[in-house]
Amino acid sequence: MFKKFFAFLLSIVFYPLFFGCLVIFHGIQVISLNIFGKKAHKKTVDALNFFLIRCLNVMGNRTSYINNHKIPEGKPLLFVANHQSMFDITMIVWYMRRYSPHFISKIELGKGIPSISYNLRHGGSVLIDRKNKRQSLPTLINFGKRLQQNNETGVLFPEGTRSKNGAPKEFMDGGFKILTKAMPEGYIVPLTLNNSWKLLEWGYFPVGAFNKVSLEVHEPIAIGSGTVNELLEKVERQIKQAIK
């Protein structure tokens, strides 16, 4: 009861800071990309997500990053993670910024949201229409080929939708099959997000407060080391075993 009461009070501070970051960095993104290029734009996006995490800190939330494994350099990478809230993306962008992760997002997010929509359209991520396979399938195939050819990093949430209570959902194999087939020389890096669902346990207001949210990296898996079903089973097991 007291936790939710303080969450209400802190959310009054959180949202002006949060949306203020989105609006300010939208303009900075436009300037950095159009004047200074993609590298400057990428650093701007990293900085945005740093400040978004600081906004979570205002709510008394703490975030941590756990990685006891060496992630291959100069190889195509596919980060595969469980999905608990919209803040999962902020965690991955900031803590995995060295690898410049690109996301697969629903097409509706490509407009209307300051900073976020602009980055999705111009930062190397892809937008898919889930209701239109004629659009989504070629987009995913081309995305995987691009990751393979340019040694880039993609992010996949195989549950499809967020878990509202932290309990993992069944991993779907559609996008996983397409991407791993398109990047045979790549590596899968399983990621487990813990407690980010608590940031939205009461909906968008108040924002969850006084939680410990973590991002844990598991041992990378060479895509060529097994069949698609074997890889998905192994990745799903690694991720779900670490959910607390």
Image (cartoon, rainbow, N blue to C red):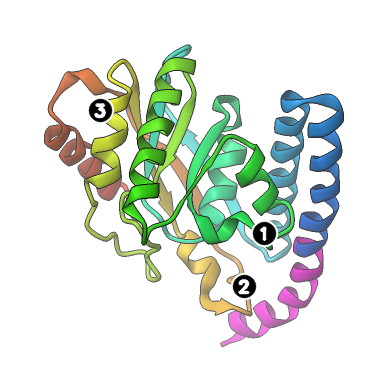
At numbered mark 3, what does the secondary structure look like: helix, strand or loop?
helix
Picture quadrant of residue 39: top right
- Viewer-closest of 38 and 166: 38
Q: In this rendering, is residue 182 above or below 199? A: above
Q: Nearer the viewer, mark 3 or mark 1?
A: 3
Tag 3 residue: 181
Can residue 157 be seen by looking at this rendering? no
Residue at label 2? 207
Query: How far apart, in angstroms, are the residues tagged by discs 3 and 1?
Result: 37 Å
N-term-proximal mark, 3 vs 1? 1
- Asked if residue 36 shows in the view, the reply is yes
Circles 2, 3 touching at the beta carbon (< 8 Å): no
Q: Nearer the viewer, residue 195 or 164?
A: 164
Gap in angstroms between the C-alphas marked 2 and 3: 39 Å
Give the spatial CA distance, label 1 vs label 2.
9 Å
Percent position of residue 178, x then y: 27, 36
Q: Nearer the viewer, residue 217 or 2?
A: 217
Left or right, 168 with respect to 209, comes to: left
The residue depicted at 69 percent of the width and 37 percent of the height is 46
Residue at x-position 74% and y-position 31%: 43
Q: Earlier in the sequence, mark 1 or mark 2?
A: 1
Q: Secondary structure at mark 2?
A: loop
Q: Are marks 3 and 1 in contact (CB under 8 Å)?
A: no
At 44% across and 39% down in the image, what residue appears?
A: 155
Q: Range of the magenta residues?
A: 1-18
The magenta stretch spans residue 8 = yes
Q: Indicate the amino acid at tag 1.
A: Leu
In the image, 76: left or right of 60? left
Give the amino acid type for the residue marked by disc 2 in the picture: Val
Q: Which residue is mark 1?
A: 56
Q: Main secondary structure of the magenta part?
A: helix
Q: Position of residue 176 (x, y in %)?
A: 27, 40
